[in-house]
Image (tube, grey):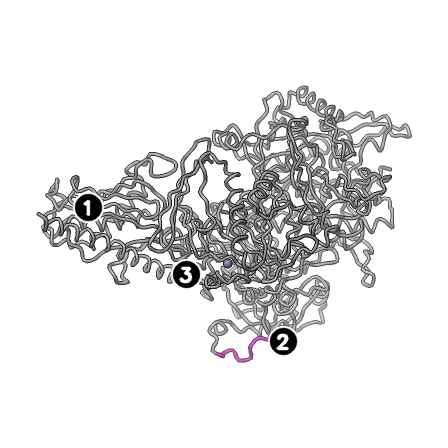
Amino acid sequence: MEGAVAKRKVLSSGLTVSQKVFVRSRNGNASKIVREHYLRDDIPCFSQACTQCSELYQSDNGTVISAVLSESPSSLQSSNIGRHYVLLDTNVVLGAIDLLESDSVFFDVVIPQTVLNEVRNKSLPIYTRLRALCKSDDKRIAVFHNEFSSSTFVSRRSAETINDYNDRLIRTTASFYSDHLKSTGIKMIYITNDKNNLELALAESLDAMSLEAYIGLLPNSQELLDLLPTLRTDFSRSGTKLKFPDYYSTSRLLGGIKNGTLYQGIINISSYNSLEGSISVSSLPKPLLILGSENLNRSFSGDTVVIEMLPRDKWKKPSNDIVDEETLGSSENADNDDPESVISDRERRLLTQEAVKAQTSGNDDDRVFPTGKVVGISKRSWRSYVGQISARSVDKTQSSNATRSVFVILMDRSLPKVRIRTGRAKDLVGKRIVVSVDSWPANMSHPEGHYVRTLGDVEDKDAEQEALLLEHDVEYRPFSKNVLECLPKEGHDWKVPEDLNNGDPQLAKRKDLRHKLICSIDPPGCVDIDDALHAEKLPNGNFEVGVHIADVSHFVKANTAIDQEGASRGTSVYLVDKRIDMLPMLLGTDLCSLKPYVDRFAFSVLWELDQDANIVNVSFTKSIIKSREAFAYEQAQNRIDDESQKDDLTKGMRYLLALSKKLKQKRMDAGALNLSSPEVKVHMDSETSDPGEVEIKKLLDTNSLVEEFMLLANISVARKIFDAFPQVAMLRRHASPPQANFEQLNEMLRVRKNMAVSLESSKALADSLDRCVDPNDAYFNTLIRIMATRCMMSAEYFASGNYSYNDFRHYGLAVDIYTHFTSPIRRYCDVVAHRQLAAAINYEPLSIIHRDKTKMDLVVKNINKRHRNAQFAGRASIEYYVGQVMKNAESLEEGYVIKVFSNGFVVLVPKFGVESLIKLNTLTQSGAAKFDEENFKLTFTTEAGEEREIAVFDRIKVQVKSVLDEMTSKRKTQLVLV
Amino acid sequence: MSRFEIYSPEGLRVDGRRWNEIRRFECRINSHPTSSDGSSYVEQGNTKVLCLVQGPMEPALRSQSSTAQGSLIVNVSVTPFATVERNKRPRNDRRIQELSATLTRTFNKAIVLKNYPRSLIQVNLQVLALDGGLLAACTNATTLALMDAGISMYDYISSVTAGIFDGQTPLLDLNTIEENELGFLTVGVIGESEKLALLLMEDRVGMDSLEKVLAIAIAGSHRIRELMDIQVRNYGKHKVAKLANQ
Ligand SMILES: [Zn+2]
């Protein structure tokens, strides 16, 4: 952007209009942009002490503007500055957002619009957090639109850089406030961490200071200083050697992306190998590999990066090695940043090995992947990270509490260590802490960050749980006041109205189904009952079957605070001993829950099914039901099996069971997949809530009874809402797996077992999986199913307008269209589906937020992300508890080799559903091993001098124990080959 | 997500206006007296449109003439420098064609065509700069140029856009940035009435917010009619004074 000229013109409406002219370079072309810019005199200063602006606060079409800055703000005793407001610069907001959010500092803050815009352009997440803070009453933060106020807007000078111009706009605002507030005796302190800007501000005799100086004046400065971001004011490029290549300029990046020489995508760094990243680029059939820290060039897993392809002779195969920070063993001294430590010799060796491999195995050219290097980062994925201080980086001999640099090792092993400065390093060792990443300059080997807060001791149950939730970005704080205010006033006393003709037109549209013999079947101890069923025989020999789903959308109306909270949480998260609800308890476990013996609102799907479970017709209605009984799976099974039971409810359940078996058979015939994942359940000792033992979940007929009817309901609803809203229907799809995903598994099967799985259709896949049987090993088939599951695409939510009908297909279920409708208490997709279905049957109009395509895209994107995070969090929780169980009980178990690397192999232990890496260097001293890549085989000599051969699919005996990982302080399973 | 706050919680839009404020509106009538029978120039914010009217005149082709009433042809062309990207827009650009068709339909009803049997009225619109509200600016410019040409009309057609932010707040007279973000509509209002001669919806505006959006769009059109009327009357006075001097 370049010089701006502004002419001003006063309009009859009292506004002044000027033109903002700037040159934007986009796609490599420069273009001149002219935008209108209106200046006004009616923007108040937001101070309650000010009398001049009092007439400017008025409600404007629903926007209520009121003075938020306190009449008597806090004062600084330790200096001559008395009562004051603060005005924050962009660098302070970006760096110290955590501090801004804390409730011990920063009240009565003015954020100029210029700062808000800069923050928004630099980091949307921080912008969102800042905007949320502006809403909270107790922080008293006001956004002052300085660029729209005629008293604070200044025009850009010719040849003034945009940064200098913005700085001047902010200083002008600070100066305006000082003058404006003079009569009130309140000072405005301008806080900036930009050295030049600070000097300019002081020269203009503003009350300005650095963040550190300001914090130093506060009474509680000691505890706050640690929270300061690292901002190197003494940073100079000339003296230091660059450790990473510089990023390309923005215009070069944009130009390159446009003309196809550069690619943009989200980088994913392997959790086995922190030096290997990959990016899927739409124009290439295979993902691009990024190998080595220089090529990764400071990117974090999840960043949106721009990459340049490397020449063909540098293309490689994905690594067969395991590489982590431990292997690299880079410098542990955080203060002494040795330039040579970036590419350690070990790393060089690994790279050389790799290069040789790619060149020598020229025969299988299709297994060579193109490689690239990161030349720019479009968007950082930086958030708060959980980790702990690397004890090795703390100098234990140091006695004083002097601030010094230490490394923090993050729990996510694909991420690099973060350097922070703290004076409490010794106290923080052995604690789980939260850190924020601030920057990663090209001359630093590790990113810079700062301490945010302590969660607790490593391995403390609560600290670990909170760490796990934070790591998976799960919102676990209690519901806010305005969310709870959306709940019915009657609370637990809420009841279905007795008089159904009480004049409420919506109530009159409900069907009274209380005479139907409805029951629910759930896991034992289930309190949030989403669904209930009934079946009865019709005079014509067909069956009437009803699936009744909790009517959440009756209580959660679109676009209310509770709806927004639910949409942002997206799903409930189930940990081993804790559930984080998507909606407040009152709804989930009481008012919406289809509890037995009481009247409840429901959304019902009613079918007429013939003897073979074909749908004769289907209808949908909002209803009132009364469940007769809430069964656990086992209870229901026993009741069905008990021939002495001859009542109508049991009969209904037997019809349901019989029909569900037919439905299942039909699905299987159509090619539905029966995949496996080791679903493990941890038994908790109910008194101490200590994990007791681990077992694999077992399935009963009644499990699949419920499942079949839920699938049927989801499919029927999907058809209906797609019919009514072809562009925005909330659906779920599961793409067929690309051939490439199965290449390795098939190769392993072919070489080791002379078997194959077919990918021609889901039916072919299902059948070929059935054929993968080892007569000597009953578990082998399940193992292959587990491995096949990992090659599958994951199912995803989508708005129907984004795909053509053929791509709606749910591969795993073998149906052409699918959605989630049956668990609205714990999934937001279902809430949307409920609203769309309600609109489709003319029960109530559909809110704009589910009709607008762009809004739906945002909803879908978020719930896909939340859904994934919830799954990961759940798995991590099980992993943690399995680790705790095994801490007390080492055992000898059977395991299967599922992956072989040149320097180790991965073993899955079915009994605990855990898998772990066994590194070669733990087995042999010489390190000498023969890796037969074609046959997925590793031959080595054990320490006892015995020759051993380990190949994929081998069944081996391993000793299972739980160890505390020295690096991440995460308890993990360790397997020892026996 | 947009790079900008389209409507901030403080109630301000990207360019500093409030929800119910129109942009700078400036117009001239009889801007090009020598090259046409009627002309006008309209600036609505940074959207700039020049309109030249030829006629009523003898149609060049027989097929264009009707004994019952006059016929109307509207041509729109956009100069290459009107937008940031400077792409060449072919004359048959679908959007431009749609624009001409909409204008023709609107003014077929606004002009007293039965007064002009066997005649042709040709409206040529030249878009010089584009920053949202193109149809509205073209409508206003056409109204003024037709008046300048002395062609009988039932009343003013004044036009403006309005959109809806977040399904909640209606925003009046959108610029390009806002048009790209919001569902909006363009109305053309007949004189001081609340009757619509034109209603074109771009993207979706929900039924529940339609009333709010229409209300503000009609009020905005009335404001624009006032501003146009002032110009027309000034020009009238000026012309009368000139005649008196002769
Ligand atoms: Zn004031």
Which numbered tag is attached to residue B209? Answer: 3
Pointer 1 chain:
B
Estimate the spatial distance between the alpha carbons at disc 1 and disc 2, rounded to whole Å. Answer: 74 Å
Q: Left or right of A546: which side holds B181?
A: left
* Type of the residue with mark 2: Asp
Q: Does residue A616 appear anywhere in the picture?
A: no
Residue A704: image quadrant is bottom right
Mark 1 or 3, nearer chain start: 1
Estimate the spatial distance between the alpha carbons at disc 1 and disc 3, rounded to whole Å. Answer: 39 Å
Structural crowding at the residue carrying mark 1, measured as other residues with C-alpha within 10 Å and reported as few (<14), some (14–19) or many (≥20): many
Q: Position of residue B180 (x, y in %)?
A: 42, 47
Q: Position of residue A279 (x, y in %)?
A: 60, 35
Whether tag 1 and tag 2 are in contact, CB under 8 A, the answer is no
Q: Secondary structure at mark 2?
A: helix
Q: Which residue is mark 2?
A: A493
Q: Left or right of A731: which side holds A360?
A: right
Observer-nearest of A186 and A705:
A186
Q: Which residue is mark 1?
A: B30
